[in-house]
Image (cartoon, grey):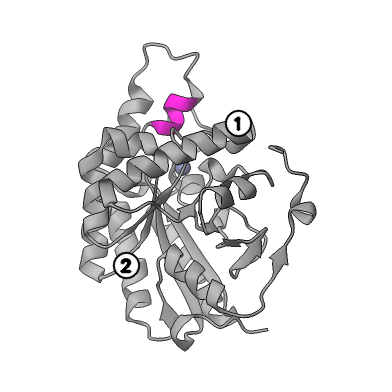
Amino acid sequence: MTYPWPGGTRAAVCLTIDFDGESPYLWRSRETRGPAVGELEQRRYGPRRGIENLLAMTDGLGLRTTVFVPGWIAEEYPAQVAAAHERGHELALHGWCHEPPTGLTGDELHDTLDRAARTLAGVSGARPVGYRSPSWDMTAGVFPVLRSLGIGYDSSLMGDDRPYEVDGVVEIPVDWSTDDAPYYRYVGGDPRPPTPTGPILDAWTREIAAAKAHGTLCMLTVHPWLSGRPARVAVLEELLAPVVADPELCTPTVRELAEHHRAQAGGRTVSLDALGRPAHD
Ligand SMILES: [Zn+2]
């Protein structure tokens, strides 16, 4: 069955920015942190430089994105997060300090996301309506928590390459193949160097061409501390300029795509029982 993409287009390409900065490192090392500052500084490149480089590129293309922002980042770097909002990008939830939901009780997840939603609302004037789990770590119990907070969509699972629904929440699926982290993330001592830009441009160009041929979603996920470096931004611009110019492709924000899906009849629906036993009940 052909998915009815917005505007009668053949396929969708979403650019999403996971604005992690230092938050995953701070959470991971919260009980063991020593004097090392190397990875912290490496990650601070995101809020200091990378986010502006990415926003300048998307401004040039006229492309709007969804920015998934840990609440801690919005509190620590309000000017950078406000800049994304003021330039037309959607802000959405990504934990408080990038805590994976598998390590939280339902109440803890609710409270961290509510705190993050209030912080993002303080920047943009409106509570976010979307969520992406840190590291795409998920449990079935996340969905009732999202519903209780009025969150209408999630973007963390890989069970389809078109929007679907889980427990009344629209799922806009992701894919490790079009996430920059497996290619670029290198924090010293890793067994392989970062992937060069050329192979990524080649691989992601093929992903977009395949999405167009098959009528699917290409969900691109980039991190300012990784893809915000100049040569990598240049490659994203080279990749996305023909996408924006192609009338057969749409480039909605994730919220826009979720609302479009909600307005359609049919589509795949997954129950919590089918997904897995809720961990937070
Ligand atoms: Zn993240």
What secondary structure is the stretch in magenta mostly built from? helix
Question: What residue do we see at 22% from left, 64% from top?
Answer: 59
Q: Which residue is mark 2?
A: 238
What residue is at 34 percent from the left and 23 percent from the top?
38
Where 211 falls versus 16 (above or below)?
Answer: below
Of the 4 image quadrants, the one containing the C terminus is: top right
Please give the residue where the numbered disc 1 appears in the rendered image: 104
Q: Tell me if mark 2 has few (under 14), some (14-19) or many (20+) residues whose alpha carbon lies within 10 angstroms of its own.
A: few
Q: SS at mark 2?
A: helix
- Residue 88 located left or right of residue 194: left
Count neighbours of disc 1 (C-alpha within 10 A) and say few if under 14, some if 14 to 19, many if 20 or more: some
Q: Write down the quadrant of residue 256 in the picture.
A: bottom left
Which residues are the magenta region? 23-27
The image shows residue 146 at horizontal and vertical percentages of 56, 49
Q: Please report the residue visible at 62 percent of the width from the left and 45 percent of the height from the top.
A: 142
Write down the quadrant of residue 139 in the picture.
top right
Q: Is residue 128 above or below residue 63?
A: above
User: Please, what is the three-letter code of the amino acid marked with disc 2?
Assistant: Glu
Q: SS for tag 1?
A: loop
Q: Nearer the viewer, residue 165 or 134?
A: 165
